[in-house]
Image (cartoon, rainbow, N blue to C red):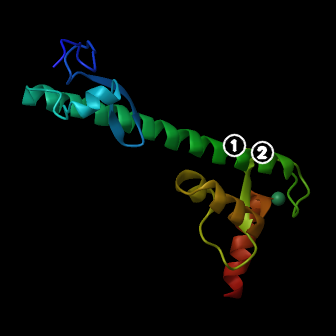
Amino acid sequence: MGIGRPIVSVSYGPVVQLVRTLPCHGRGRRFKSDLDRLKGGYMPYKDKAKQKAAQRAWYERNDALTKQRTKSRRNRRNQYKEEYKLANSVCPDCNISYPPHMLDFDHIVSNKVDTINKIVRNGTMKQLLEEIPKCEVVCSNCHRHRTYMRSLKM
Ligand SMILES: [Zn+2]
C-alpha cells in the first residue's frame, strides 16, 4: 500500500455540464469530452421547464435550417429553369425571341410526370433534369394555341 498519487488525476468542473452545439443531423447534444460522456449526464436540466424550453429552442433552430435549405434548393432549380429558357428564348412557332417570363414549357412527349413549374416548386433537381427534355420551350401565346389545337383532336 503505497502512499502514491491516484492513477488518474484530473480536475474538471461539473461532470454533467453539456456544451450545446449546432444541430448536426438530428444529434443536438454534444458532450464537452469523452470524460463528460462517461460520467453520464443525459439530463442536463434539473428544471423540467428549462429542459422543455431548450428542446423547443433546438427544434426551432432546426426548423429554420431545414426551411433555409429547402429554399436554397428551390432557388437552384428555378435558376436552372430560367437559364434554360434564356438559352432557348426563340419560340419555334412564331420565331420571335422572348424574355423568360413569356416562355412556357410545352410537353411534347406523353410520359409527363408533372409541370416544370410544379417540379421547380416541390420536386428535385433530378426530376427537373428528367422532365425538361420532354418539353419544347414556346411562347405563352403559341403554347395556348398548341393546347387548343390538341384539344380539338381529342
Ligand atoms: Zn410563339
Q: Quadrant of ligand 1?
A: bottom right
Residue drawn at 88 percent across, 60 percent down? 94
Q: How many residues crowd around disc 1 within 10 Å: few (fewer than 14), some, or many (20 or more)?
A: few
Q: Which mark is residue 79?
A: 1
Q: Position of residue 142 (x, y in %)?
A: 78, 63
Closer-to-camera residue (17/105) = 17
Taking 57 as reference, is 113 above or below it? below
* Residue furthest out toward the front: 1
Secondary-structure class at tag 1: helix
| In the rendered image, the vertical position of residue 36 relative to residue 142, given as above or below | above
**Looking at the image, do the residues carrying marks 1 and 2 touch, with CB atoms under 8 Å apart?**
yes
Taking the image as drawn, is residue 140 in sight?
Answer: no
- Pinpoint residue 4: horizontal percent, then vertical percent: 22, 13
Q: Please give the name of the residue rendered at 76% of the width and 73% of the height, measured from the top-left corner.
A: 108
Which residue is nearer to you in this view: 33 or 136? 33
Residue 83 - label? 2
Q: Callout 2: helix, strand or loop?
A: helix
x then y, percent, for residue 85: 78, 50
Q: Position of residue 119 (x, y in %)?
A: 59, 58
* Label 1 C-beta lies within 8 Å of the nearest ligand 1 atom: no
Left or right? Give the position of 52 relative to 105.
Answer: left
Task: Identify the residue shown where x is 88% and y is 53%.
Answer: 90
Q: Residues within 10 Å of mark 2 (few under 14, many from 20)?
A: few
For the residue marked with disc 1, what is the amino acid? Gln
Who is closer to the viewer here, 55 or 136?
55
When asked about the image quadrant of residue 130, the answer is bottom right
